[in-house]
Amino acid sequence: LQSKKVEDARSTYEMFFQAFPTASRHWKMWIEHELAENNEFEAQNLFDRCLRTNLHVDLWNTYLRFVGELMRRRSPKEENEEMVKAFEFALENIGYDVYSVSIWGKYIEYLRRRMKETVTSQYEEDERNRTLSRTFERLFSLPIFDADKLWSEYIAWRDEQRHKTGLPSSHRMRPDATAGSIKLEEIYPRVRALARDRHARYEGLNRNMLCVPRTKATED
């Protein structure tokens, strides 16, 4: 199907999704088909149709890449505001998925990179650090599989912030910027064990298998 021009394939896509509206991998294929022909408006419409009912990590990563490409044409301030909105939107919907570590990781990487590129005052640095701290806390309070690398990154970042408290007070982070770190060290081992248990339960399942949502007719 993807070898065809997308305008010739749309009717087939539409018929397919009438039967399988939660086929996330196929929504991703259609969206990538549109983007391959630079049809950004059509791709945005498809995201609007499918995201909330298709909680699939690969599809949501495709959405974040799409927003990132669009935002590169905006001013740095607009780009930052819209990317944070996009990441938060993704985390609200799929951030609890046991395999969503890639989305969390990309958000944390984005926050840290933008902090280095755009922070111009101590106040802005403190605000970004608070946002980053809250993001780490949210992540490590959820049973997300394979988050150990991000845990190591968090510990290094936390220790770096603590080291900064030896600087003059005008350069210090606000006290609440790393609040919750002691609690996280108590919580994370239990949460990690739960994530590994869930992974063991899901491992081997084909999460791309086509399914038909339940309807009144199928219940009868």
Image: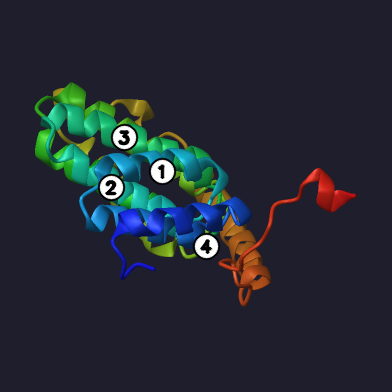
- Which is closer to the viewer, label 2 or label 4? 2
Q: Which residue is most to the right?
A: 220
**CA gap, disc 3 to disc 4?**
23 Å
Bin the neighbour count of mark 3 within 10 Å (Cα to Cα): few under 14, some 14-19, many 20 and up.
Answer: some
Between marks 3 and 4 in the image, the one whose residue lies nearer the viewer: 3
Of discs 1 and 3, which sits in the foreground? 1
Residue nearer the viewer, 162 or 11: 11
Q: Secondary structure at mark 2?
A: helix
In-image side of 128 versus 18 (left or right): left
| Mark 3 vs 4: CB contact within 8 A | no
Q: Quadrant of the N terminus?
A: bottom left
Mark 4 surroundings within 10 Å by alpha-carbon count, few (fewer than 14), some (14 through 19), many (20 or more): many
Identify residue for label 4.
145
Reading the image, the residue beneath label 1 is: 47
Relative image position of residue 102 (x, y in whole percent): 39, 58
Instruction: Give residue 118's position: percent from left, percent from top.
Output: 11, 34
> In the rendered image, is residue 102 in sight?
no
Mark 2 Cα within 10 Å, few/some/many (few <14, many 20+)?
Answer: some
Amino acid type of disc 1? Phe
Q: Position of residue 135 (x, y in %)?
A: 40, 40
Residue at 65% across / 64% down in the picture?
Answer: 198
Q: Secondary structure at mark 4?
A: loop
In front here: 62 or 44? 44
Q: Kindly identify the amino acid type of the residue bearing the numbered disc 2.
A: Phe
- The three-letter amino acid code for the residue at tag 4 is Phe
Residue contact between numbered discs 2 and 1, judged by CB atoms under 8 Å: yes
How far is mark 2 from mark 1, CA to CA?
10 Å
Q: Earlier in the sequence, mark 2 or mark 3?
A: 2
Q: Nearer the viewer, residue 13 or 92?
A: 13
Residue at 62% from the left image edge and 55% from the top image edge = 19
Write down the residue under mark 2: 66
In this figure, which residue is indicated by the disc labeled 3?
84
